[in-house]
């Protein structure tokens, strides 16, 4: 057994850098277990961010298990009871069958999802600080022991037994700890999306074409997110003209509905980046969400995996936080489980993002995604309940 260094004095068990979906969920679960947690978020509460919105069954299951799904629904997020897959000359409509207490999918705006999780973290006893920018990590004897942060009240040093990086693709925690990329994807797509009112859909609609894919995702306030996923070389600056061109070519039926609907607000464009798995932990630190694992959004599974990994990490921390050696072991187990669940989907997303497949291969890729995500749901549904007790 190895206790934490005697000179490592702190009032905190865990500092979470980032309080969006992955970070807020992690802070919530840790606080529900009685740990002393501070989550630091550089943006203001409710700030929007680039996102695909769509939660798959595993993500909805997590929100339900945590007792916060009702808040997402109450905020006006509509239930999605079917998914359409359009590729290879056929259109498949798949009903969402009730399983593990989930009878619909949901795609909340990040202006809804992130504050709901952050509020739940606060209710559990975590401190959530907005407008707090982390500028560096504190180290002692090769171990991360805290963060340097600045905000409206000036600079501060905060110390904790563990620092969790939930700070996205450009994670400061990953960069400053030198977290190695253990698996690197090769392909990626750019994306342009916007929101329309008055646009009927059959639920989630995914249309895959080699020249560019598109789809429709019903979200809150009666809006539908329509996106175009295209090769980076053809994206340019993105925008409405690029989006309409891709939709017209790939999905004429969706284009007709889009033409009769009303665009609400500007479109947004993301240039894309290759997916990766990073080393998930080290002395005094761990990564969750996009900070540690990112895949091309063409498969729309990023938020679901972020919520999955928030609980896997929280359970590891809760089990090991009392002893440094124990924590290293439980975090290693977290990384092993995360990688086992994530690597098949990362590899599949890489192939989908290449836009270099024929219809037979794409059909195989869709089946592979279904198999991987079904295994993920079974794992989550089979977890015991102690970490959730604070929800009651």
Image (cartoon, grey):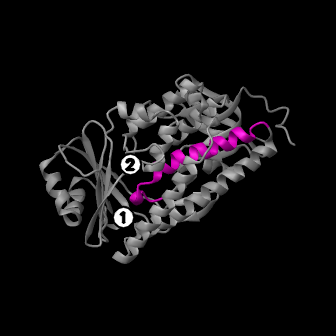
How many other residues sit within 10 Å of disc 1, few (<14), some (14-19) or many (≥20)? some
Q: Which residues are magenta?
A: 295-322
Residue 223 position in % (x across, y down)? 25, 41
**Is residue 54 rendered magenta in the image?**
no
> As drawn, which residue projects farthest toward the right?
1
Name the one closer to the observer, 268 or 360. 360
| Residue receiving disc 2 | 54
Q: Answer left or right for 195 relative to 68.
A: left
User: From the image, which quarter does the C terminus lie in?
Assistant: top right
Can residue 97 be seen in the rendering of this structure? Answer: yes
Residue 51 position in % (x across, y down)? 39, 47
Res 48 quadrant in image: top left
Magenta-highlighted stretch: main secondary structure? helix
Q: Answer left or right for 362 relative to 7.
A: left
Can residue 179 be seen in the rendering of this structure? Answer: no
Res 362 quadrant in image: bottom left
Dot in front, 1 or 2? 2
From the viewer's perspective, is residue 147 above or below residue 206? above
Residue 311 position in % (x across, y down)? 59, 43
Residue depicted at x 41% and y 66%: 366
Name the one closer to the observer, 274 or 295. 295
Find numbered disc 1 in the image and state the secondary structure of the residue it sits on: helix
Residue depicted at x 50% and y 42%: 62
Res 357 quadrant in image: bottom left
N-term-proximal mark, 1 vs 2: 2
């Amino acid at each position: 057994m190895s206790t934490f260094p005697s000179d490592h004095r702190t009032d905190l068990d865990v500092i979470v850098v980032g309080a969006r979906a992955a970070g807020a969920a992690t802070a919530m679960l840790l606080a529900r277990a009685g740990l002393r947690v501070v989550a630091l978020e550089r943006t203001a509460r409710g700030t929007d961010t680039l996102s695909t919105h769509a939660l798959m069954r595993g993500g909805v299951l997590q929100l339900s298990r945590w007792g916060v799904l009702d808040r997402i629904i109450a905020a006006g997020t509509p239930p999605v009871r079917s998914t359409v897959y359009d590729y290879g000359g056929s259109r498949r409509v798949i009903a969402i069958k009730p399983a593990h207490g989930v009878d619909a999918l949901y795609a909340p705006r990040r202006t809804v999802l992130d504050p709901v999780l952050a509020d739940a973290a606060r209710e559990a006893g975590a401190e959530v600080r907005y407008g707090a920018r982390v500028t560096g990590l504190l180290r002692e004897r090769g171990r991360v022991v805290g963060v340097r942060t600045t905000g409206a009240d000036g600079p501060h040093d905060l110390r904790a037994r563990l620092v969790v990086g939930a700070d996205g693709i450009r994670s400061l925690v990953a960069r400053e700890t030198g977290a190695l990329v253990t698996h690197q994807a090769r392909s990626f797509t750019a994306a342009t999306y916007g929101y329309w009112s008055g646009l009927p859909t059959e639920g989630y609609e995914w249309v895959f074409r080699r020249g560019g894919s598109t789809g429709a995702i019903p979200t809150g306030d009666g809006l539908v997110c329509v996106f175009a996923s295209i090769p980076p070389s053809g994206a340019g600056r993105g925008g409405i003209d690029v989006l309409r061109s891709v939709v017209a070519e790939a999905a004429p039926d969706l284009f007709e509905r889009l033409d009769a609907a009303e665009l609400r607000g500007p479109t947004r464009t993301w240039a894309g980046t290759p997916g990766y798995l990073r080393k998930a932990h080290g002395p005094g630190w761990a990564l969750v969400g996009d900070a540690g694992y990112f895949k091309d959004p063409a498969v729309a599974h990023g938020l679901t995996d972020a919520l999955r990994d928030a609980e896997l990490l929280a359970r590891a921390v809760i089990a090991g936080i009392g002893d440094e050696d124990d924590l290293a072991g439980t975090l290693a187990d977290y990384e092993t489980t995360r990688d086992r669940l994530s690597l098949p989907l990362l590899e599949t997303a890489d192939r989908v993002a290449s836009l270099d497949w024929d219809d037979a291969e794409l059909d195989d890729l869709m089946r592979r995604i279904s198999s991987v995500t079904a295994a993920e749901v079974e794992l989550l549904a089979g977890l015991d309940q102690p970490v959730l007790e604070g929800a009651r």
